[in-house]
Amino acid sequence: MLAIVITKVILSMAVIFFVLNMAAILTWAERKQSALSMDRVGPNRASIGGIKLLGLMHIAADAIKMFSKEDFIPANAKTFYFYIAPIFAFAPVIFIFAVIPFGDVLIIGDMTIKLQIADLSFGILFIFAISSLSVYGVILAGWSSGNNYSFLGALRGCAQMISYEVTMGLSIIGIVIMYASLNLNDIVLRQGDMLLGFIPKWGIVLQPLGFILFFTAAIAESKRVPFDLPEGESELVAGYFTEYSSMKFGMFFLAEFAEIAVVAALVTTFFFGGWQVPFLGREGLDLPVIGAIHLPNLLVVLMQVGAFIIKIIFFCWLQLQIRWTLPRFRYDQLMKLGWKYLLPLSLVNIMISALIVHLVTTYR
Amino acid sequence: MTVKFTIDGRTVEVPEGLNIILAAKRAGIDIPHFCYHPYLSVAGNCRMCIVEIEKMPKPCIACGHIVQDGMVVHTNTDMVKKIRKGIMEFLLINHPLDCPICDQAGECKLQEYYMLYDCEESRFNEQKETKEKVIDLGSMIMLDRERCIACTRCVRFFEEFVGDAQLTLRHRSDHAEITTFNGKPLDSIYSSNIADTCPVGALTSKDFRFKCRVWFLKSDDSVCPGCARGCNIKIQHNDGVIYRIMPRMTPDINKFWMCDVGRLTYKRYQGNERLTKPLVLRGQRLEVTILEEAIEELLESLRKLAKDGSANVAGVASAELTSEDASAFKSFMGRVGADKVFLDQGKDTPGFEDDILIRADRNPNTAGLKKLGIEQPVDELDALISSGKVNVLFIAAGYRGKIEDIIKRHKDKLKLVTTFAYNESDLLEGSDVILPTLAWPELKGTFTNFERVTQEISPALAPKGDALSIKDIVSQLEAQMERKAIAVA
Amino acid sequence: MKELKQINTKDKLSQNHMMLNMGPAHPSMHGVIKLVLELDGETVINCDAEIGYLHRAFEKESERGTWTQVFPYTDRLNYVSPLINNVGYALAVEKLFDVEVTERCKYIRVLASEISRVCDHLTCVGASAMELGAFTAFLYMLQAREYFYELTEDLSGGRITPNYVRIGGLAHDLPENFKEKALDNIDKVAELISDVDKLLTKNRIFFDRMRGTGYIPKDMAVNMGFTGPCLRAAGVSYDVRKDQPYLIYDKLDFEIPIGVNSDNYDRYLVRMEEIEQSLNIIEQVLEKMPDGPINIDDPKICFPPKSQVYGSIEGLMHQFKLVYEGHHPPEGEVYHAVEGGNGELGFYIVSDGTGSPYRVRVRPPCFFMMQAIPRMLQGEMIADIVPTFGSINMIAGELDR
């Protein structure tokens, strides 16, 4: 029992460490990425003892800045809610990582450790339950700031998150139907199978439409361009966190970047095989022509975790690239897209998936 | 008697005896000239004023020809233009490239005429003649021989106006230069006039040198406060600072000139010693206050004294006041029961005097005050105070008044001294209430000179601090008295 | 033809509407301007534009200095296309003098104007894109503008405040190798513009955001005094370069693009096409550029060359007089208009014969378009304020003067 607690604690620490660092690095990556796509240099000035590391020191500089700036609270703000809003924005993002599997099982001696903090049988429900909480962060922040811009931002954010949550939920039902589970680890494990012997049975193969719907809705959930209306700086200055400064702003900032990582992790988990590497089983490689190659468990786990992280990084990059390519929607267009296109499509997706699964199971 | 003549196709009727330059001016035509000056004799050495006169074989200088009936003058023919260009080119051959460091730039006739009548490029490839540049000519004037165009206006000024030929032209042609005998400094009090008359930057005023570029100066007409002559002047100032005083042409009073004493009077009005806030004696110290409060305290003290029945009031007015201020002051003195207002002509009077311009009376408005009935000299006050017949004084002070000494002598015998002053002086020590007033450059009013000519002065500068004119202060005092129904007498 | 959106303003004073002060310190209110908005949710019920935050008394200030000293101030009118302002003011003063500049000077002035026009359009389109969230397109446009700023810098020594044109000529001639560099930079700019074209023109989100928003009917646009790209987008073919040709515009081959729908998208398209046309004009001008003097031969108007100023008393006096006393144009009043980046940029000048202008009045093109802003925004959504306001291309320096 004690061993389990200790391993879970260590695992949790590792995941939090990973997420926070990921978020921090993403702040840098976003700037570097935008600089690359805009043909400029990007951050390169911050140096600690002459070390610049391609501008990576900006992360440290930003952190110092965030902590040392004046924590200003506007006179009209409702102080208590103003304080708790950043927590509501930030905490759910971290929680979601609790159910995401980072790898298969790690065997140390006679102990088998699942590389997942909480292997919940209702994992997907947990994700939706938790992620819905972050809307409180937005609405509390906007309302408690006592600023019209914040208020408008909060209204937009609230409406947008609730609308797209529907699509997000429905688009994932296809996956649930296909893999017949709400447990994320099960879903990932089932994506290890092969179709026709050589195509990995990943979500993207079985649910291409589901992937597009989910990814779109997920970006909308994380309020990034082209769905960044709640904070569109040319309209609402900075939206619901206009009045925030110092580390309270830093929490929103971190939450936003952690959300990128969350979306990438969810997309990877549902549609890109999670930690699965094609042809890599628990015992080693199982190639179609060459045959089985036995590999030590530690190496397998490392490969799986590595693959998972690489996939996450890829989807983070993809989100950044979208961010720097597209303009922003208008509020009515956003609603139209959500309710008139994405929602019907996700319903269609469910029906088609159900039909296929029904046909396959009936006439196998 | 008038004569009719034709200039550039226009027939004009002018008084007899004018030369062509002056006559053309009446017709609205400017004929360029360097050496000619309306109040100096004709020299005819610059040749710039050349015009064509019909039936004359050659072009003539306009300054040297008196208009005659039926004369036909052309100032704009090709030949005249060509001659002007030629003259300008000759004058500029040896002229140094000094405009950026020359005080005359901006009011320089060379620059003006170059733009109007020349505008050609230089054809001179040889070495320019160089001469001595910074030559000290006494306390007021600096000479630069390179810039000189040898028009001899300055020489003629000393010969004809001052009557003391201190300057002369020596050597010839390119080497001609202005000099004093043996390099002796100029010692006339009219020497600054040659800086004004010099058409170029050869003679510059030491006082004005490198202080301000002339195109920044704003000019306001006024009358010199230096003596009883009342020369007409221009106050030239910028951003609230007076930079120089220039004479203004008035045929009857000062013609074109003024003295160096008058030129420097402006300095007494813009030192650090100007008063800007009312002061009231509280205990042993003079404290800064506001006008309303100072008036309040003054009237309170007056009322107390009047109750005792021990108030013997007298007024002293400086001859520097404008007639308007003096009149207001006098009527106020009447209200507070002073039967006499004494005239203070200041410590500088009598000064030296000559029969050219400067007068021994160094006040601009003695005649004006006398006309108002303020004529008893302030010296008589001495005896009155020591005998106790006067113990309350109102002083409308000027610059260095004689009253300063009287106050110093009888400090303990005076119960209440109120001073209207624009400068700090010894008066401050003996006064109980000091009210800041406007000084000459800020005032509007009239001065009457010793010839009984009354002339207007107009404000050039904005008031300093809380200062008001005596007239305004007095009217406030009177209003307050009325409100409180204080009767002193 | 679409109708202007009608808003029921009966319950104008209803407590349910939100008042929102957009600006003067707001990221998308370029320069400083304030829009007072009455909002019903996301919909704009009423809008009031408050201008004047950047009033620097340009017109009054012009009366203080000499005629030449106005040039640096004109740089600061529409600071995105300063050279056109320079040219416009110079042409007005020359009209007063009744002189005509040399042939080469005319070509260089046209070149300068078109360089500025491209800069102006690039900034406008780029900024609109940025405000819609497409930051990359903005920076592409700025990169392109940078190439043209380089040319401006080569011409005049300054990037934003060139102060290049003089009465009767120019401050100096083209630098060496200017033609090669210009042609090279034009190619680079054309490439960047085609990139942006790909990024934006057929981008569904961009299209949806721009099409149909900021609509103004043609007759209203004419009545309100619209000029420039905004008027042409409404379908009126009016361009000062074609209709009252100045300099050498009548000798050049270029076309005036006009729009149909009078909305933000058409304004965007018109500006994109005008950039192409301007690039074309620059190429033509560079091709045909004649040799010769750049200043007219009149010492009363043109400054002497510096060699004379420092080398001879004549030159020095000449310079001195023109600098501190200024030119002396004949008495009278003139109006001269040029096609600025935003439309008809007019200078109405009154001279009393002295060395400084008696009155300089500017007809800033965007001032007239600003008065239509409330009408264009009524019934639109908050998010439409930004592209509409952007497509007007209000430049506060010129609007408030």
Image (tube, coloured by chain):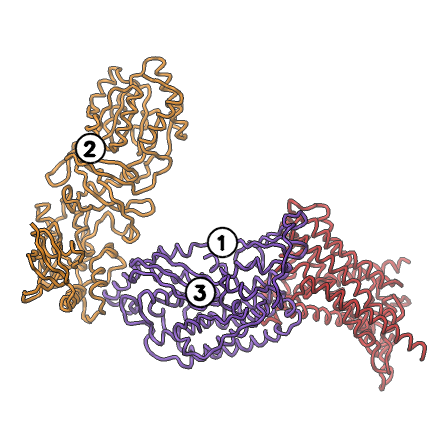
Chain colours: A red, B orange, C purple
- Disc number at residue B348? 2
| Residue bearing mark 1 | C52
- Rendered location of residue B422, percent (x, y): 31, 34
Q: Secondary structure at mark 2?
A: loop
- The amino acid type found where label 3 is placed reads Leu
3 and 1 marks in contact (CB < 8 Å): no
Q: Position of residue C399 (x, y in %)?
A: 48, 59
Q: Nearer the viewer, residue A309 or C186?
A: C186
The chain that hosts pointer 1 is C
Vertical order, B473 against B268 (above or below): above
Q: Is residue A61 visible?
A: no
Amino acid type of disc 1? Answer: Gly
Question: Does residue B28 appear anywhere in the picture?
Answer: yes
State the residue position of label 3.
C345
- Where does the C terminus of chain A fall, quadrant-wise? bottom right
Mark 3 vs mark 1: give the one in front.
3
Quadrant (top left/top right/bottom left/bottom right) for the N terminus of chain A: bottom right
Per the image, label 1 sits on a secondary structure element best described as loop
Crowding around mark 3 (Cα neighbors within 10 Å: few <14, some 14 to 19, many 20+) is: many
Q: In this rendering, which labeled residue sits more in front, label 2 or label 3? A: 3
- State the image quarter where residue C30 is shown: bottom right
Q: Which of the marked residues, 3 or 1, is nearer the chain's N terminus?
A: 1
| Location of residue A275 in the rendering, given as x and y in whole percent from the top left corner | 81, 71
